[in-house]
Image: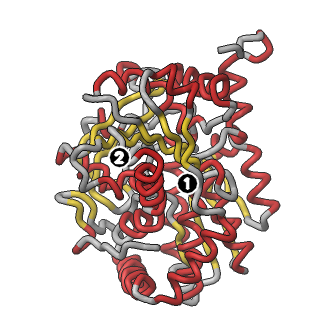
Amino acid sequence: MLTGAVEPAGRFGDFGGRYVSETLIPAVEELDVAYRAALADPAFRGQLDGLLKDYVGRPTPLYFAARLSAHVGRDVWLKREDLCHTGAHKVNNTVGQVLLALRMGKRRIIAETGAGQHGVATATACALLGAQCEVYMGAEDVRRQAPNVSRMQLLGAKVHPVESGSRTLKDAMNEALRDWVTNVEHTYYCVGSAAGPHPYPTLVRELQAIIGREARAQLLEATGALPAAVIACVGGGSNAIGMFHAFREDPSVALIGVEAGGLGLASGKHAATLSMGKVGVLHGAKTYVLQDEGGQITEAHSMSAGLDYPGVGPEHAFLKASGRARYEVATDAEALEGFKLLCALEGIIPALETSHCFALLPRIAETLEGSGPLAVCLSGRGDKDLDTALEYLGAASGKLHA
């Protein structure tokens, strides 16, 4: 069930807000009113809860990873969002947003996607609920996430490859915003992460917070205690904010996000926005942004399409600035080691996004006091990433053994 918590004026401390053109102000204000009304409507919440249970497959399991725990030197529990219908956490958000769009009388749904999981999840929700779906995706991501493109098309979505800029997630979001401005009266923009102008960061957070609520209750039932830390990968940040939210008032629980270090911070080819970015405005919100000295947005790099974004959700910016959460960095090479590690030790092929977390678990465990467990949000499965992973790992040379 949704918590109903809404930040005044869409601000998280000094971050967030609504930095959009005048054309879009009525649309975001309409969405804000509709979203608050939906949260207060037992019928809407009941329909959403029913779909999350019977269609999405919630609650997802909390799995004790025994062999991984032995490797890390501390108990590790995995929140298995990879077992959601469509294979990732994204569907928690899209089912809720498409229900909201239909409640608002808007049957044309547009979305942006990087790794393709949000696109697949949006197409899935639209097919389920009878809405038209169009997805913007960077041409480079179309290439490296071809299986998800096929899934979207099979589900009835029209996929628009975006050739501008770096041809990745940032550019897909730019094109989706242009579409929304042009067709705002009859189109709903289903944002995929806890980013963008108010009310999207709060709306997406509320729809993803079920991850952390379930994990908290499951950990208490299984262990009788809270974890020493909850850990999640961060691109835009929806799976992480969904995992973190239920633990934000527990000072004994460290909140740790892991960003994409790409080829290394010194190389400049990374997506470590919270670690290396500066405060600016991107896609309608004030947050940390990768930018040059002139304030121009710089290209992000990650082998993981879902983390390849030069901004981050404003609530993560607040958690960093306030010191409540800390953010680590894992490179492409480290993420590949994390990918191989989970495959070899637990028989689970993780998404490359979450693989960034597994690479750092031994290091993170050493920094925490006591012996409490670690809870990791396994945000998605790795089917979509096999071609990319095999390309990097050199499958033809027989280099796949961990």
Please report the residue visible at 71 percent of the width from the left and 23 percent of the height from the top: 391
Residue 111's quadrant in the figure? bottom right
Please report the residue visible at 32 percent of the width from the left and 43 percent of the height from the top: 255
Q: Going from the N terminus, do you reach mark 1 or mark 2 first?
A: 1
Q: Which amino acid type corresponds to the residue marked 2 in the rendered image?
A: Ala
**Eyeballing the image, is 378 above or below 275?**
below
Residue 102's quadrant in the figure? bottom right
* Rendered location of residue 313, percent (x, y): 36, 54
Q: How many marks?
A: 2
Give how far apart the Cα atoms at labels 1 and 2 are: 42 Å
Closer-to-camera residue (290/94):
94
Q: Which amino acid type corresponds to the residue marked 1 in the rendered image?
A: Ala
Q: Tag on residue 39?
A: none
**Eyeballing the image, is 400 above or below 342?**
above
Which residue is tagged 2?
Answer: 225
* Rendered location of residue 217, percent (x, y): 43, 57
State left or right for residue 86 relative to residue 94: right
Mark in the foreground, 1 or 2: 2
Closer-to-camera residue (117/185):
117
Judged from the image, the secondary structure of the residue bearing numbered disc 1 is helix
Which residue is tagged 1?
Answer: 172
State left or right for residue 215 relative to residue 352: left
Q: Is residue 291 visible?
A: no
* Rendered location of residue 401, percent (x, y): 70, 14
Judged from the image, the secondary structure of the residue bearing numbered disc 2 is loop
Residues at badges 1 and 2 in contact (C-beta under 8 Å)?
A: no
**Eyeballing the image, is 111 above or below 218?**
below
Q: Is residue 205 visible?
A: yes
Please report the residue visible at 68 percent of the width from the left and 73 percent of the height from the top: 126
Residue 396's quadrant in the figure? top right
* Rendered location of residue 44, percent (x, y): 52, 85
Closer-to-camera residue (122/227):
227
